[in-house]
Amino acid sequence: MKRLFLFSIVILGHVFTATSFGQVSYYYEGTEVRSTTYDEPHYRGPVRSFAADINGDGFWDAIVPSGLQPPDPPGSFELRILINDGNGLFSDETNAIISGPVPTICALKARFADFNGDNRTDIFLSSHGYDIAEAPGEPNVLLLSTAGGHLVDASSNLPGYSDFTHPIAIGDIDDDGDIDIYVGNRHLVPDLPYKLLTYFLMNDGSGVFTVNTSRLPVSMTKEDGFRGDTAAAIADMNGDGHVDFISGAASDPWRVHSSTIFYNDGAGNFSDDRKRDLPYGVLGEAHSVEDVVPIDLNGDGRLDLILSQLPMNELPGWCIQILMQESDGSFTDETNLRIAKDQAYNPDGPALTEPIPIDFNGDGTLDIYFWDVNVWDYPDAPKLLLNDGTGHFTMVTLQAFNGFDNNLLFSMALPIPTGRGGLVNILTMWSHQNTLYFQTFKGDTTPTTAPTVTTTAISSITTNSASSGGDITSDGGASVTARGVCWSTSANPTTADSKTSDGTGTGAFSSAITGLSPGTTYHVRAYATNSAGTSYGSDVNFKTSYAYTLYVSSNGNCGDISPCHTTIQAAIDAASTGVVIKIAQGTYSESITLNTSKSLTLQGGWDSAFSSQTPNTTFIKTPKAPQGSLTLQMVTIQP
């Protein structure tokens, strides 16, 4: 049985439907930045990549077949395979996945399918090498799976032409149970015969391919009046059970033609007698179609078409066309009805290419994500046609979703399905010199919030320290990166005040509060921090112990307690900061002055045994404190 492992870039020959599960909000959180290196200098900028489940673990991985393009000097580099750990983090596992030599290629597109019939993912990479007209081209690459779960370079199963391949498409065109390939060259390169500008690669079922041009329409193989294409797709457009061939227009000053559907004759052949020319878009004849995506937009069971286009001279500007298939097989241009006004065409913006049908915002309907958009030069460029659920779209930027860092939204931001209810992660890549960097923005339908934390009761109180801590019962959906307690003499302290740092993660933790002053009231709160912010536990207050206590009795009798002073001034002079001075009941007519920077507490109303206090029984003159501070408790000031 044939198996196509078709990521959204290459979903062809399939009617897209989605089960609605309601509109939800969508949020993103950036993970750590990871990297891998090349043996030689690379270049600075965005990196082309593709996605599929390479190792069969159910998670989508990334394939990076990058090279240098103008204005940089020519250069192709070893393929890189980044494996997804299932949590959105990727690592370079190229040498573990590929047995034998790793191919070197500057690929433009990739297609994934079971080409050799072993029910594992294989890869076809189309290449053009250095993307200028006079370039020598580059052979395409085929990676086939092996019994051990690895991939091997099986490019020898291809014809080995030095192609200048741009459009490719895959499908079982002759209904023999295996996947064939269409290859379209943009123009001639040295040693490539004119008649091989476009050709089919017919699969023998084991992943060995033979060139065939006889199945193509004559208009695509003849030298005189040759029609080229820059986009292609293979899908059953008329519902007869046989896949058809869609050729996207590639207009040049010397050749002008529309995009065309060539219908399968039932035996895998396509001819100019069985075709349907498609309506031109807003650009008219002066355009080229970069991508064509068959998709059922209105749920009527018929495949419609989305085409991304460029002006003939390939100047900046995007143009999107939506063609809806009618019951008689004809197509109606409903672009202006299905895309918000003035959003389908912008002559001043970047090209929007590589449209990917994918449920981006988790509402159960397919949106259109433009994977190849030059936001390096156009940071505010849109990348997404957001479906309202009825096949009508609004163009938005990724910045419309919470959590994206605009500095990391490089051109090749690759959507990675998670398999969790339509959720999508975004893998961004960029390169500098010989290092490839990559970071995942993880999507979720609930916002990341600050953690939930409680404050532990205060214990082990001394004159200058205490113990507390906290318990983090929820991380809020993101890793807790900092936790501890903070304190101040004011209520509701924050991490801007004194604090501890007591590790990361959830659960209970202990904190040592130090550097306190004796006899002072402090407020403490536990805190926890994640990417959404910092949260706090409740405010808990306590008072540190006094350093020691002095006693005052006007008759010099303090019972068995010592030291016992007969004047308050003598006790003040003898005390150090933080001391409490307990004063027996009576009237003290002496002058009281604090001339040093000490903090002292005067407590009155004590009985002769200093065991209990009675208000309004200790009378003193107004004390003076040119320096330091005096706290008065249960004393009465008299003239």
Image (spheres, grey):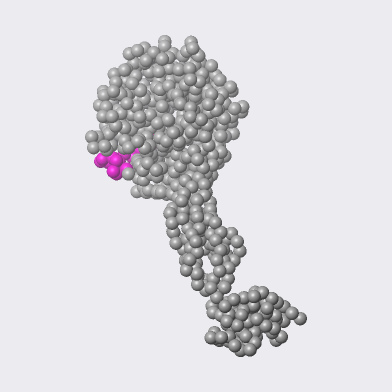
- Give me the residue at 43% from left, 21% from top: 15
Image location of residue 447, percent across then percent down: 51, 42
Residue 158 location (% of width, % of height): 29, 29
**What residue sits 50% from the left and 55% below the top?**
454
Name the quarter where the N terminus is drawn.
top left
Quadrant, the C terminus? bottom right
The percent position of residue 615, horizontal first and vertical second, equals: 66, 74
In the picture shown, does residue 449 fall above or below 540? above
Q: Is residue 120 left or right of residue 514?
A: left
The answer to whether residue 227 is seen in the rendering is no
Is 328 magenta? The answer is no
- Choose between 440 and 72: the one closer to the eye: 440
Whether the magenta-drawn stretch holds residue 98 is answered as yes
Q: Quadrant of residue 88?
A: top left
Numbered-mark total: 0
Please name whichever residue, 308 or 195, is drawn nearer the observer in this view of the structure.
Answer: 308
Check the image and name the residue furthest to the left: 147
Q: Is residue 498 left or right of residue 633?
A: left
User: Residue at 52% across / 32% down in the picture?
Assistant: 23
The residue at the point 32 percent across, 23 percent down is 180
Give 306 or 124, whichever is nearer the viewer. Answer: 306
Residue 244 in view (yes/no): yes
Q: Position of residue 331 (x, y in %)?
A: 51, 16
| 263 to the left or right of 378 | left
Q: Which residues are magenta?
A: 94-107
